[in-house]
Amino acid sequence: MVVLSNRLPVDHVVNSDGSSGWKSSPGGLVTALEPVMRAAEGAWIGWAGVADTEFEPFENDGIEIIPVPLSESEIEQYYEGFSNDTLWPLYHDVIAPPQYHREWWEAYVLVNRRFAEAAARYAATEAVVWVQDYQLQLVPEMLRELRPDLVIGFFDHIPFPPYGIFSQLPWRKQILKGLLGADVIGFQRVADAGNFTRAVRRLYGFTTRGNVVEVIGDDGDVRHVVARTFPISIDVAGYEEIAARPEVQERARQIRHDLGDPKVVMLGVDRLDYTKGIGHRLKAFGELLAENRLQVEDVTLVQVASPSRERVATYMALRDEIELQVGRLNGEFSTISHSAIAYLHHGYPREEMVALYLAADVMLVTALRDGMNLVAKEYVACRADNTGVMVLSEFAGASDELRQAIIVNPHDIAGLKDAIVTAVEMPKREQARRMRALRKTVNGNTVNDWSKSFLDTLTGRAAVPRGIPETLVNALRELASADELLIALDFDGTLAPHVDQPEDARALDSAREAVLRLIRLADTRVAFVSGRALVSLQHVADPPEDVLLTGSHGVELKLDQPDVTLDLLASEIDRLDHVTAILERIAGSAEGAWVERKPAGLALHTRLLSPAAGQSLQRSARSRVRAAEPGLTVREGKNVIEFALRPGNKGDAIAKLREHTGATSVFYAGDDVTDEDAFVALGADDLGMKIGRGRTAAGHRVRGPEEVAEVLALLADFRAGFLQAQKRERAYTGSTPIVTES
Ligand SMILES: O=P(O)(O)OC[C@H]1O[C@H](O[C@H]2O[C@H](CO)[C@@H](O)[C@H](O)[C@H]2O)[C@H](O)[C@@H](O)[C@@H]1O
Ligand SMILES: O=c1ccn([C@@H]2O[C@H](COP(=O)(O)OP(=O)(O)O)[C@@H](O)[C@H]2O)c(=O)[nH]1
């Protein structure tokens, strides 16, 4: 795996004595990704934090680091400018006004290209490349152009703005196009993913179905891009381990002592950023002191404001503002023995952070907008004794999960003050009740869970366990009570195990038996949906009389009537002959490749070749056919590329079958890339089941044809049970069911 982010986990530093070295770099992205990368084999590509310096790749704490150089002017225009003075405020609710400068955009494009080129150089064939965050939104598309073999993921660590705000961006279409180069785009919150898909619909008119965007390329080909939420987290066990160390606990006691042992220590930990709501927090605290609702002898606020983006004008102004506010409040309310606010403009190492979390009775997270806010999760992970209260802004992503915090709107200063008082006065029992629940939530989604679920979605590599998952059993039980049920099944790899020679494929006996049971049931139809030509499907599947058939990806149909023939025009037959000649030549150049002629198209099979050789053969077939006979529909499957005269896919087949049968619910099972068209055509009352590994839009997954047979048998049991019960009920209530008008 290759990870790309603007920041590396370490920054290069030159000390005052002229010596140099590497230190941990700031921010939650690094906190989250570091443990993931230490556990994974792979390289991390990013900027070393200094200008105009080239570094050779090196290893740091078990991670291979590949630095990408940036010049002084690129840092100004790409990082401080476009990333942090255009995108950052725009994506954070325009809390500060975004600046739009064309030369910043040009630098952004240039640096994104440099990152894409670095990834293209380092990634092995068919490797997974995981691009991080708003600084690199153009990389997915650039990288796909350079290396179409790669699997590309993108994770957005910050909010994705609503269309009304996003649309301000002069380069909004380019940004979306860049992102859509990824196979999976991850967001922190459901709302972010929704904002993104809405923008895609508005600006490109692409169809989105649930989490899947149908991206239509310049050549008319369709790619399915998954855009969904994956809330990021922390290395919970790592924080718990540090919090349990005696020396860290001693340090926490020392901190409280040094603060004058106040009754209550409140803590804020943020990069000094206008998104974090530090000013709102200080205002609320100041008013509580002024109104005597809190006393300076009892309550101290520790505010860590770690330095961030210090050359950006908005950040300089913020520092002045906050420090003026702190100075005023301390001047007004501190006594010789008690400071109101301990203000620390430093970045601290992790052990010191944990000691602060242990020392704090109340954690204040009052962000005006924040992608996630890992500080909130870290505080919870450290409170093993179930004490402590968190006040948490509803505008931080963490509030979606940490529901037992005291959730606040930081703009409502009166509400924020009440929340702070509630936190300060909260009885220990109530603290424990809430903290237990918070800890359970944080433990239930660690950073490993986050990366695993993202990467599993990306690569479809989740080892598919044997057996039928409980969630699938429940969904089948529900599906079995449909008024009119259609069970549509792919054949190869679903009912029949894959074999080297397509004509040798046969359905498993157990699958055949289950199908025979299903077709005997009332209000239940079974269909086979195959990419094969109908005649080939009939040969291998030997389908029972009542099974509906669709072949050639829905172009051929046999629906309760004698065979359907396809009328081809003479010109279409000429085109097929021409493409046959081209493909035969290509197949002839590689031992083990062969061409299959279909009623309305051709397929080049490469399954006996190595994956790399197969891919390269498919690429050359694609470009030569496109040049010679433009306008054919191209479909890529596992080890096969098809050229069809007429468009049509398994999604269309489902629509035709649904119409023919009047089905109110559809069950669809398939294993191949072409089955994804069918999965995205399913609706809320339907059930999609993917067979084996691979990215999918299906809601369920099983391992192989044996499990498919089990699932079909189970569905037959449930359906028979439902129909029996329905029959009994009708007999009991006097034949026909009661129909009410609405
Ligand atoms: O690299 P910097 O410019 O110094 O900024 C530090 C990082 O800030 C942002 O962090 C975000 O990621 C966190 C983890 O997902 C999330 O909890 C937080 O809400 C975000 O703001 C930024 O997104 C990173 O790229 C920066 O490295
Ligand atoms: O002095 C400091 C201040 C913060 N952090 C860490 O920086 C990260 C901040 O991440 P968060 O998601 O809260 O916000 P971001 O800074 O990424 O916007 C957390 O892991 C903090 O523990 C740190 O190590 N030292």
Image (cartoon, grey):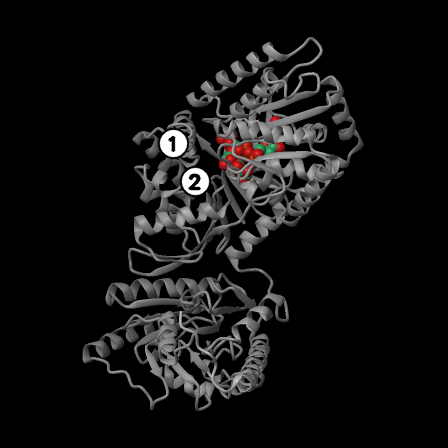
Which residue has dot 1 on it?
A: 86
Residue 670: x percent and y percent?
48, 72
| Residue 94 against residue 337 in the figure, above or below | below
Seen in the image, is 68 located left or right of residue 232? left
Residue 3: x percent and y percent?
52, 44
The 10 Å Cα crowd at callout 2, few under 14, some 14 to 19, many 20 or more, is many
Residue 717: x percent and y percent?
59, 81
Residue 435: quarter of image: top right
Q: Which mark sits nearer the N-terminus, 1 or 2?
A: 1
CA–CA distance in space, label 1 to label 2: 14 Å
Q: Nearer the viewer, residue 1 or 203?
A: 203
Q: Quadrant of ligand 2?
A: top right
| Residue 581 against residue 634 in the figure, above or below | below
* Amino acid at the residue labelled 2: Leu
| Residue 353 against residue 610 in the figure, above or below | above
**Number of residue marks:** 2
Seen in the image, is 359 located left or right of residue 308? right
Which mark lies nearer to you, 1 or 2? Answer: 1
Residue drawn 64% across the image and 12% down it: 334
Q: Residue furthest right?
A: 246
